[in-house]
Every structure is written in structure tokens, then in C-alpha cells.
Amino acid sequence: MDLDALATARHAEWHRLDALARSSGRLSGSEADELIERYQSGASDLSMIQTTAGSTALGDRLSISLARARLRFTGAPENPLSQFTGFAARSLPAALYRVRWLTLACALATFAIAALVAWWLAADPRALANLGTEAELRQIAEEGFVAYYSEHPAGSFAGSVWTNNAWIAAQCIAFGITGVWVPYVIVQNAINLGSNAAVMFVYGEADDFFLYIAPHGLLELTCIFVAAGAGLRIFWAWVAPGARTRMEAIGQEARALFGVAIGLVFFLLVAGLIEGFVTPAPWPWVVKIGIGVLALAGLLVVMLVVGRRAALGGATGDLDEERAGARRITAG
């Protein structure tokens, strides 16, 4: 093969390919089509050069142009920092914003059931007796409930409650599609909350109940409500997929809302640290509850303020879908 003759014949096409690949602006639709067409033609030329002449300077230059073109229409791989920034600033808040009303519904359901359980147990001594003997219940109310938060080293206790709550949150999202797992978790948590409240109220320790629950419970319970809401949204995508197929609907919701599980790991870590180090600390209660309120406020700002802004900007919570959309815009 006469490489000089080939280079002369293809010079204009290869030059145009390189120019399109180097272009820094957004390509029009016709330019994007031309880039792909010239890429395919150039790839055929490179294959012919390498087959007949092996490695050559001409082939290397063409290979570089093709690499630039391929990068242009496939998109440059993002570095981990950019991916994390996009997730934390757009995808996670947008996904949290999508489940705001379901989160509220799960919170209201939990507190309603817990209040009914607490009222029933407190009003019926026979029902309360099923939880333990008089001596056992009094010991829990007067000593055990408060001692629970300080009977283990703060660090290991914080790690234990963090991993346990993160596992519960992950289960709510992963098994939410069943439609029964989330209601089961909500009812179990509500019964546990209501039972503890009843014991503490009956034995005159209601103040300790609220004071020791509030610092960490504000953020911890809200995280569980968010996870429950995300699980229910995935279930609803299966029940009512709309114009999408069921698999498409479930896939889109799952990709967006599994990011919620990752985000909740961080917020539950904060809740665990508060439960391990702040709740049992000998500080004024206004300080400890204030820390819990600030932690909850942080989550709500991310969900309702940053999330609303991200959603209005087109974020869906699905980072893969958003990156693909950005590449389509760049390609024209």
C-alpha cells in the first residue's frame, strides 16, 4: 500500500475528523452525525493501515484523532471527586426530595401507631403486665432505660447503633418492592416506641423518655422514615408504572433511590455519634437536644431546600441518567 497516496486522498477527511474532535463548543445535530460518520470511516482506514503496514507514524496520528473523536461522543470519564460532588450536591438531594411526602406519611403512621400502643398499655394493666413483672418494668423505667445509653463504651455503642440502623434503612429500600416489608418495619418500630413510652409514663419517668430519645432520635427516626418512603416509592413504581414498562419504572426508581441508602449511611453515622457521645453526656439538656435539632435541620435542608433546587434544575436522583443526558446535550 502507498501510504503517501492514502494520506493525500484522505487528508481532508482526517483533518475534518480531527477538527470536529477538538471542537470545544457544543456540536449541532448535523456535526454530531458527521463526527460519527467520519469516525467510522477513519477507523476503517486505520485498520487497513495497521493490517498492511503495521505500526506507522501516519497510523499513530490517525489513532490519536480517533481517540479524541471517541471521547467526544462517549464523554470523558469523571474523576471520583467530580462524581462524589455531583452525587452529594444534586443526585442525593433530588432523590430525597422525591420521597418527601412519603417520608411524612411514614412518620405520621409511626407516631399514630406508637401513640395508640402507649395509650392502650398505659390504660390496661393486664396488657402492660405482658411486657414483664412489676419489678422488671420498674427497674427499666427507673434505671435500665437511662443506663442503656452508657453501659457500653461510647465508640463501640455508636458504631453498633449506626450499623444496625443503616442495615434497617438498606432493607427498607431493597425489600420495599415487596410492599409488605416497609409496613412491617414501621409497625415494629412503632410498637417498640409505644411500649417504651408506656412503661416510662406509667412509672413517672416520662421526662427521661423524651430527654433521652430526642437528641439522637430526631435524626435517626427521620432517616428510617426516609428509607421507608423510598422503599414504598419503588413498590409504587411496580404497581403504577405509568407510560413506562414495569421493569423500566422499577429500574429508574431503584437507581435513584438506592443512592438514598448511601446518603443515609452518612446521616445515620451522625445519629449514631450523637447517641453514643451526646445523649449520655452530662451536659445541659438544652445543649443536647439543640445538637439533635441542628442535625435534623441539616437533613431537612438537604432534602427540601437543596433537593427542590436540584429537582427544578432537572436532577432526578439517577446519576447515570443525568450523565447520559449531559453527554447528549454536549453532542448536540
Image (tube, grey):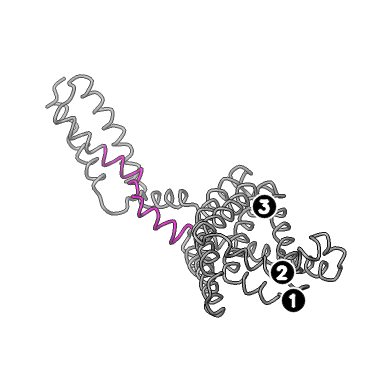
| CA distance for labels 3 and 1 | 43 Å
Circle 2 sits in a helix, a strand or a loop, which is it?
Answer: helix
- The kind of residue tagged 2 is Ala
9 lies above or below 73? above
Query: Looking at the image, which is closer to me, 36 or 213?
Result: 213
Residue hosting label 1: 204
Kindly identify the amino acid type of the residue bearing the numbered disc 3. Answer: Trp
Residue 9 rendering spot, x and y as whole percentages: 17, 30
Q: Nearer the viewer, mark 3 or mark 2?
A: 2
Front-most of residues 313 and 206: 206
Name the amino acid, label 1: Gly
Tag 3 near tag 1, CB within 8 Å? no
Q: Which is more N-terminal, label 2 or label 3?
A: 2
Residue toward you, 175 or 266? 266
- Residue appearing at x 54%, y 61% in the figure: 96
Residue of label 2? 141
Where does residue 208 sit, x and y in percent of width and height?
66, 74
Main SS type for the magenta part? helix
